[in-house]
Image (cartoon, rainbow, N blue to C red):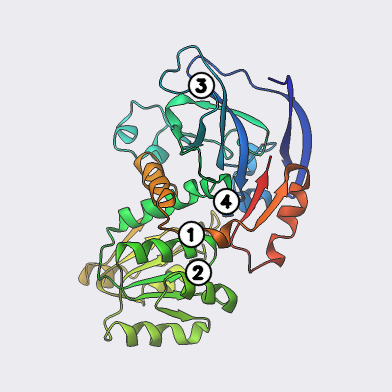
Amino acid sequence: MPGMMKAAVLTKPHRFEIEDRPVPEPAPDEVLIRVGRVGICGTDLHIFNGHYAAENLPLVPGHEFTGSIAAMGNDVNGLALGQKVVVDMNIGCRRCYWCRRNEVLNCPDMQQLGITMDGAFTEYVAVPAYLVIVAPSDMDDAVLALTEPLACVVRAARKAQITFGQSVVVLGAGPIGNLHVQLLRTIGAVPIIVTDIAEERTEMALRVGADVAVSDPNELHQTVMRHTDGRGADVVIESVGKSELYAHAQRLIRKGGHIAAFGLTGPDELLELDVLTTILQENSVKGSVAGMGQDMHDALALLRHGRIETDPFTRSAFPLTDIQAAFETIADAPGELKRQIVL
């Protein structure tokens, strides 16, 4: 075990510094992970740009990761050195009302790897052993690093109670929007209507399971009504994070329909809700943002058995030393659904 490691520290918005740090010593109930791959998440971009969790800087971000067990605390059982693993990023107290209901994000003592505490843009990271999930040894690291973002999508579908035969509109065809489309196809939702102003991304969404794609915002409402017999969609998933899209979603759902609030907005953005219509039509809005617990296991199973087309997510990789460039140029590559850091 080396004594020192490289870590990418976001010292302030838009500025990473590669630092030499001591390799963490795992606590008795922790596991030390030798990080293999880490995905760059939309949340990481929000942190990079100073729009989210700025109060936690300096910080080592990174939470979509896989690696192998390098060391274990004395109280850890049921795991072995060298096992390939993925990690649930959400750390709760495990005792409160919310933790018992697998709603860890609402735990008063909740911490998140790479957001409220140092994460995985580093060679080694120590994590609580109960959050470690053993992965098949023959699965590729690039695919395993998709477990956490897919778990977020699994949880959103679960919260929205989406089932076969339902019509769903996905607002945004970026990385998460694409995963929403793929999971909806697996569930049996139909029709799946996706919209994005980037035609390249709507074309990718069509290739992985969308039934209809719209790149002109002025055509979206008419298209949704045409493909739902004039009712509107059963569910609309907002996966971009813009208040105007949330407002538009209210006009796209059917009476009794549901808005799945997923995309992160700015902290000061508000949604003007048509309260009377929401009541009279029995519409609903439900938030979901992070996968946890069983969501992670379900996501890993979907990846293991090839239910998700992963190739568009695994083509672009940067070494840790180039993390600044990886973040700065990500907006210049709309055809890339995911960038990963390789350690």
Pick whichever of labels 3 and 4 is earlier in the sequence. Answer: 3
Pick whichever of labels 2 and 3 is earlier in the sequence. Answer: 3
- Point 69% across, 60% down: residue: 330
Where's residue 107, x and y in %?
A: 40, 34
Where's residue 94, x and y in %?
A: 36, 27
Badge count = 4
Q: Quadrant of residue 277?
A: bottom left
**At label 4, which amino acid type do we have?**
Thr
Pick whichever of labels 2 and 4 is earlier in the sequence. Answer: 4
Give the secondary structure at mark 2. loop
Marks 1 and 2 close (CB-CB < 8 Å): yes
Where's residue 343, x and y in %?
A: 69, 39
In front: label 2 or label 3 = 3
Marks 3 and 1 close (CB-CB < 8 Å): no
> Disc 1 marks which residue?
263
**At label 2, which amino acid type do we have?**
Gly
What's the distance in space between the residues labelled 3 and 4, CA to CA?
Answer: 25 Å
Label 3 packing within 10 angstroms: few (<14), some (14-19), many (20+): many
In front: label 1 or label 2 = 2
What's the distance in space between the residues labelled 4 and 1, CA to CA?
Answer: 10 Å
> Disc 4 marks which residue?
43
> Disc 2 marks which residue?
172
Pick whichever of labels 1 and 2 is earlier in the sequence. Answer: 2
Asked if residue 59 lies left or right of residue 75, the reply is right
- Point 61% across, 29% down: residue: 125
**At label 3, which amino acid type do we have?**
Glu
Marks 3 and 4 close (CB-CB < 8 Å): no
> Disc 3 marks which residue?
30
* Mark number displayed over residue 228: none
In front: label 3 or label 1 = 3
Asked if residue 135 lies left or right of residue 161, the reply is right
